[in-house]
Amino acid sequence: MGIAIAVVLLVVLAAVVLVGASKRRDRSAAGLSREARKRDRVNPVLAEQESPAPTGREVEAAATAARSGDVVTVESAPPEPFVVPDPMALGVSRRQFFNRSLVGMMGLGLSGFGGASLAFLWPQGVSGFGSKIKVGNLVELLADIEASNGFLYKPEGRMWITAYPNGAVEKARATYSAPELSGMTAGVEGGFEAGVVALYQKCPHLGCRVPNCVSSQWFECPCHGSQYNQVGEKRGGPAPRGMDRFAMTVSDGVLTVDTGTIVQGPPIGTNTTGQEAEGPNCIGQADGH
C-alpha cells in the first residue's frame, strides 16, 4: 500500500516538473532575452522603428488642416413644397401588406365564383333539342312532307313531322290537348291543305328510335314490333300508348315546335284518322303485351 502511494506521488511530481519546464520554454521562445533587448535599445535604426504611431485623432486633425485651404461654398437649392403623404401608403408594414393582399385575393376569388354562379343560373339562349325550334313555313313543310313520302324527319329536334288531315280535326278536338291541337288544326283554321303533328322519335315501349315504313305508311318499331299510324296513334305491338308528341304553335303560318315540352301519346284504341296499313308491314305484326 505504501509503495503504491509513493509511486503516485512520484508520477505527480514528474508531471509538475514537466509542465513548468514547458511553460518556461514557451516564454523564452516567444520573447527575446534580456541581453538582446538591451542591444536593440542602443541601435539607432531600431529605436526609430519603435517610435509610436500617430493616433486616430492626430490623423483626422491633419486631414482637416489639409482641406481647410480648398473649401468651396455652394448655395443650397430652394426648398421643395410640402406634399401631404397618402395616409393609406404611409407606414404600411410588411404584415399590413400581406393582410391586404390576402383580403384582395379572397375578394377576387369570391367575385369570380359569384360571376360563374350567375352565369350558370342565368337563362341562356339554347337551340336544338330541348328548346323551341322554328321548323318553318307550314306550306313549305306540307310540300316537304309530300316529297318525303309522308314522313319528314328533323334531326335537330329528334322528331317526325307528318300531315294531319283536315277531315279528322273534329275527332282530334275531343281527344288531344291544346298544345297538340295548335298544329293539328292549323289546316282548317289557316286554310292550308292539312295540319301537322310533331312526334317524338322514341318508342314509348322501351325507347327505341321508331322509323317509318314506306310500304305500310305507318311507323314500325324494329325492337319489339310496335306499330303506329301516320299521326302516331298505336295500331299494334307491346307499346303502352301512342307515340309521344311535342307542343306546337303556329304564328303567321310558321310552325314552332317546343321540344322541351313532351306530351304523352294518346291511349290505346285512339284512331282519329282511321288510317289502315296501305301496304305490307316492314315489321311482322307483334302481339300486344
Image: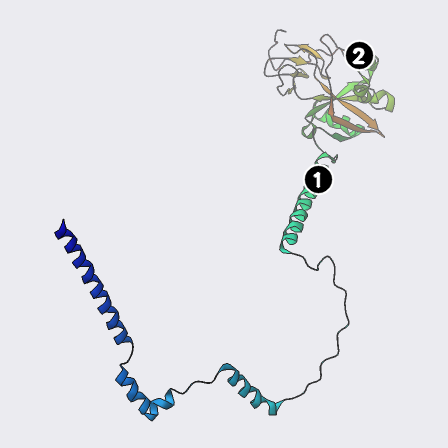
Left or right position of 124 against 281: right
The residue depicted at 80 percent of the width and 22 percent of the height is: 183
The tag on residue 145 is none
Where disc 1 sits, the SS reads helix
Query: Residue 200 occupies which quadrant of the picture?
Result: top right
Q: Residues within 10 Å of mark 1 (few under 14, many from 20)?
A: few
In x, y percent, where is residue 36? 27, 85
The residue depicted at 27 percent of the width and 82 percent of the height is: 34
Task: Give the labeled residue for mark 2.
Answer: 175
Where disc 2 sits, the SS reads loop
The residue depicted at 72 percent of the width and 13 percent of the height is: 233
User: Is residue 260 in view?
Assistant: yes
In x, y percent, where is residue 250? 82, 27
Give the CA distance from mark 1 to mark 2.
48 Å
In x, y percent, where is residue 146? 73, 24
In what quadrant of the picture does the C terminus appear? top right
Task: Give the labeled residue for mark 1.
Answer: 114
User: Is residue 126 in view?
Assistant: no
Depth check: give the residue in front, 102 or 126. 102
Depth check: give the residue in front, 143 or 1. 1
Mark 1 belongs to which amino acid?
Gly
Q: How is the image coloured?
A: rainbow
Query: Residue 13 occupies which quadrant of the picture?
Result: bottom left
Depth check: give the residue in front, 283 or 65. 65
In x, y percent, where is residue 211? 64, 20
Q: Are marks 1 and 2 in contact (CB under 8 Å)?
A: no
Q: Residues within 10 Å of mark 2 (few under 14, many from 20)?
A: some
Q: Is residue 209 above or below residue 76?
A: above
Left or right position of 235 against 66: right
Q: Is residue 187 above or below residue 10?
A: above
